[in-house]
Amino acid sequence: MVEREHRRTGPAVVAVVTALGVMAGGTGCAGGGAAAEDARTGADSVEVVRQSAAALQRAGSSKARTSMEMATGGTRVTIRGEGVYDYEERLGQLKVMLPQDPAGAAEHRPITELLAPGALFMKNRGAGVPADKWVRVETATLSDGNLVTGGATDPFTAAELLRGTRTATYVGETEVAGTAVRHYRGTADLELAARRASAGHRDALKAAAKGFATAVVPFDVYLDDQGRIRKVRHRFSFVNGQRKGTVVVASTTLLYDFGAPVDVRLPGAADIFAGKIAEP
């Protein structure tokens, strides 16, 4: 049963990893010319970065690659994802690849994630969930607002976080995947981002502002000549209750092929697992 079908064809880890399993515990627009002028002069970098989410909405859709890294127990863990996202409807789909076990064997099947305003749907969640069922999580109930829980940061939430930019410095021009970009480095405030975010992501960012060790999120972002994010890297800090220390998770999102077709089908109630989820 499909509750909703969405198609787009026009152009235009404490929380993440317990062992090696995933667990679920509008603004104005700035044109590309203005952004390019700011890049050359280094002026008003904060506002240029804040407008990047609006630039994605104008672009309509894109493909995305994600990477999430954390160090735990002396081992660096990396979770990768790949998929598509519609920025107008705020719907996306990612295939998330969990890391191999220490022996090198691929122990986990890819997890399919559907991203929607206020919700995360996961399939192949494992841990007692039937193979044909989805797990649905309200992102506002997660202490990190699903910035790290799913093993991939929702691409539009990553952009909305930049609406809360407090400081930004223009670093210079470079390239990302062969595209000329402008590199900015700065910090974003989760509480400010929540106030500025669209309705579908506001509550999740509010939760993250309370759940992380600090509401200040350092970032590096790379914008093309239309002000669109080509690459963004956030560094999230949260408290590891078991070790009583602060853990830093680095989340990188790469966006490309703008205007790519997007086909997201949200599951109906009959397709969602209603039982108890076992711990990995």
Image (tube, rainbow, N blue to C red):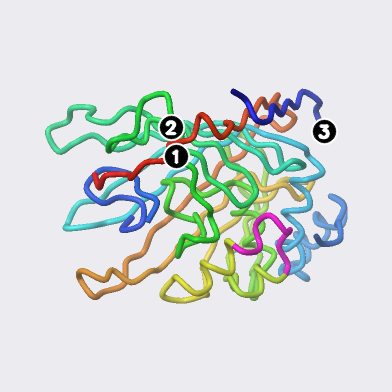
Q: Which residue is mark 2?
A: 123
Q: Percent position (x, y) of residue 43?
A: 77, 70
Mark 2 belongs to which amino acid?
Lys
Disc 2 residue crowd, few under 14, some 14–19, many 20+, Cα 10 Å = many
* Magenta span main SS: helix
Locate the N terminus by quadrant: top right
Is residue 101 found left or right of 192 in the rendered image? Answer: left
Q: Residue at x 67, y 30 (%)?
A: 257
User: Is 87 displayed left or right of 267 in the figure?
Assistant: right
Q: How far is mark 3 from mark 1, CA to CA?
A: 32 Å
Q: Position of residue 143 (x, y in %)?
A: 45, 65
Q: Mark 2 vs mark 1: which is more N-terminal?
A: 2
User: Which residue is located at x 18 percent, y 36 percent?
Assistant: 101
- In the rendered image, residue 162, in percent from the top left (x then y), is placed at 65, 62
Comparing labels 3 and 2, the label whose residue is closer to the camera: 2
Amino acid type of the residue tagged 1 in the rendering: Val
Q: Which residues are magenta?
A: 196-203
CA–CA distance in space, label 2 to label 1:
6 Å
**Mark identifier at residue 135:** 1
**Residue type of the residue flagged with mark 3:** Ala
* Residue matched to label 3: 12
Rounded to the nearest angstrom, the CA distance separating label 3 from label 2 is 30 Å
Q: Find residue 235 and report its image quarter.
A: bottom left
Label 2 residue SS: strand
Asked whether residue 276 is drawn in magenta, I would say no
